[in-house]
């Protein structure tokens, strides 16, 4: 039995489709509302809430492998519940910043979760993806309304990753031998700047999208209102003020593990263009 948490999210939904298509199973998808969840045929929808780890007990019953995205709840309690349920292997989605910027708050929190998992006694595989292609959805409302897209550090290029590539690596780690005790840094196939991302979206929509670079101070004010000041500082440090070669490095880990090259940002845009129309 494999339990996929975050089963309706960008990674979890893609992972369930891949697992089902490859005949893996039995499969469960964790959701807060099983009645509203739309999963592939043959996937059991189970309810649970990370904010209430006790609610996970029925979902974990009989589970041998767990897919977990870090920092969505009390990770210590979640891992303890998994251990008590007899889970043997956990594939954890952390962040590449755990190795490139461990001094920053959110990155340090991810690193702490990794250490909790390693100390749990369960087998583990840790995935450390870079910036998600789906982060571009934060511009969707402005683009739909034909407004100017504002972004800081417009020329900073990061090897943005398609969430489905994270799912593909997770599927291999969950179903094939040789991945216990491994940590994988995951990136897309090429660095892409914020300006280039908006240009790619504009090309897919066949229209101009106004773009303007804003200052760190302006960006911080906007982000802090949504994510809090510490998280805003961390994101801005990573993407501009403290960006480094290791963070910008393109890695071929996706291709090595899955046998298929990482998907370019343009592919993610073509698959999600309707979100910007």
Image: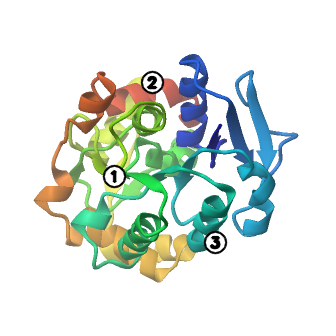
Relative horizontal placement of residue 222, taking residue 39 as reference (left or right): left
Q: Are marks 2 and 1 in contact (CB under 8 Å)?
A: no
Q: Nearer the viewer, residue 31 or 161?
A: 31
The disc placed on residue 77 is: 3
Q: Which residue is mark 1?
A: 181
What residue is drawn where x is 75% and y is 58%?
56
> Which percent across, then down, holds residue 111?
37, 70
Q: CA distance from mark 2 to mark 1?
A: 35 Å
Quarter-of-image position of residue 198: top left
What residue is drawn where x is 51% and y is 42%?
143
Q: Secondary structure at mark 1?
A: loop
Quarter-of-image position of residue 118: bottom left
Q: Nearer the viewer, residue 232 or 129?
A: 129
Q: Earlier in the sequence, mark 2 or mark 3?
A: 3
> Which percent across, then down, holds residue 166?
42, 39
Q: CA distance from mark 2 to mark 3?
A: 39 Å
Q: Residues within 10 Å of mark 3 (few under 14, many from 20)?
A: some
Q: Which residue is mark 2?
A: 270
What residue is drawn where x is 77% and y is 58%?
57
Q: Quadrant of the C terminus?
A: top right
Q: Residues within 10 Å of mark 2 (few under 14, many from 20)?
A: some
Q: Nearer the viewer, mark 2 or mark 1?
A: 1
Q: Secondary structure at mark 2?
A: helix
């Amino acid at each position: 039995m494999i339990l996929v948490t975050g089963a309706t999210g960008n990674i979890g939904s893609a992972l369930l489709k891949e697992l089902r298509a490859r005949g893996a199973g039995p499969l469960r998808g964790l959701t807060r509302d099983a009645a509203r969840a739309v999963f592939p045929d043959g996937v059991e929808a189970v309810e649970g809430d990370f904010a209430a780890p006790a609610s996970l007990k029925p979902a974990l019953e009989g589970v041998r492998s767990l897919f977990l995205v870090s920092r969505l709840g009390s990770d210590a309690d979640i891992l303890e519940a998994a251990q008590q349920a007899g889970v043997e292997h956990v594939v954890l989605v952390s962040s590449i910043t755990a190795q490139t910027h461990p001094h920053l708050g959110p990155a340090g929190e991810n690193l702490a979760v990794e250490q909790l998992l390693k100390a749990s006694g369960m087998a583990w595989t840790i995935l450390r993806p870079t910036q998600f292609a789906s982060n571009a959805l934060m511009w969707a409302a402005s683009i739909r309304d034909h407004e100017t897209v504002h972004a800081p550090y417009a020329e900073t290029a990061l090897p943005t990753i398609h969430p489905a590539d994270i799912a593909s690596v997770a599927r291999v780690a969950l179903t094939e031998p040789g991945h216990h005790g491994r940590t994988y840094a995951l990136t897309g196939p090429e660095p892409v700047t914020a300006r280039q991302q908006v240009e790619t979206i504009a090309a897919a929509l066949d229209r101009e999208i106004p773009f303007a670079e804003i200052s760190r101070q302006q960006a911080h004010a906007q982000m802090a209102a949504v994510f809090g000041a510490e998280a805003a500082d961390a994101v801005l440090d990573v993407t501009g003020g403290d960006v480094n070669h290791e963070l910008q490095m393109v890695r071929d880990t996706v291709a090595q593990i899955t046998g298929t090259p990482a998907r370019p940002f343009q592919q993610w845009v073509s698959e999600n263009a309707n979100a910007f129309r």
